Image: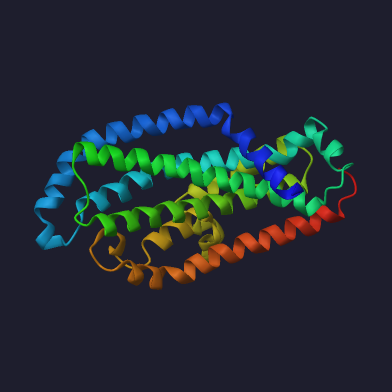
Amino acid sequence: MALFDIAWHEFRRVLLHPLVLIVGLIVLAVAYLNGAGYADTLRLIGSMYDVYRADAFIVGVSHLCASTSMASVIVAAFLSATSIPGDRWKNALNVLLTKPLYRKDYLLGKFLGLSAFMLLFNAFVFSCISLMILVYYGGPLSIMDGTLKVISYLLTLTLACVLVIAFNLLFGVLSKNVLFVTTATMTFIFVDRLWLSENFLGGLSILLPTRLYYRILDSTPYVPETPLPLDVWVQYAMPYIALLLVEIVVLLLAEIHIFSRDENV
């Protein structure tokens, strides 16, 4: 129960964070402006459906999702970067660890609370995007197919954000210095979002959340934007999804090991 208490407390903490309100308003504005401005392009795509086999609604969701994904990554990075250092700064961690609470439960509770929030936040993002496209253009060619593909985008972006959370919790475990954690977070976001990151990391750039996110969505050319069955996309995307999940598990195990051995909170 202690684990879920920590998770619920962390969820409520980030839900009321000022950054969430600011970014949420930005997402609403972007969805509105892009939905209105993109409507004519979607109508053109829809008129050429027989030629390009593209569902204009899904094309619109995928493009707007790409333009707003940065907002989700920033929210995940900064909320997770301030989580453990914030508790240390306020001496809340010292108080918590005097109670019957395992260190791994504290860390996993933070992780679960942040991950649950990002699922909710991304659901809000996708709801705004889908609603604006519905209002200004129209719905998908197939309600079932469109719904499943939008959910696949939602879950993929959320998994990428969860990987960002895992990275940033590691920074918080490694250092008690808020400045170091913040600097590491900023550097991480910059490298992660830099399209030329392979120049710095080579083949290792595939391990970055954003790279994996786009590889999962584009693992098969144009599959998420066409009437092809969703299971075809899942088949090709599964190796990248598996890599993303393995990274999350490895980072969590490393954090638990380091944090459990750290006697100096």
Which residue occupies 35% across, 68% down? 233
Q: How many marks?
A: 0
Residue at the (35%, 70%) spot, across then down: 231
Q: Nearer the viewer, residue 173 or 127?
A: 127
Q: Nearer the viewer, residue 80 or 103?
A: 103
Percent x, y of residue 117: 55, 42
Q: Is residue 186 visible?
A: no
Against 59, residue 247 (above or below) is below
Res. 250 in view: yes
Spot occupied by residue 201 in the image (x, y as percentages of width and height): 56, 59
Q: Quadrant of the C terminus?
A: top right
**Residue 239 placement, left or right of 28:** right
Q: Classify residue 196 as left or right of residue 105.
A: left
Q: Residue at x 22, y 35 (%)?
A: 37
Is residue 197 shown left or right of residue 40? right
Q: Picture quarter containing residue 187? A: top right
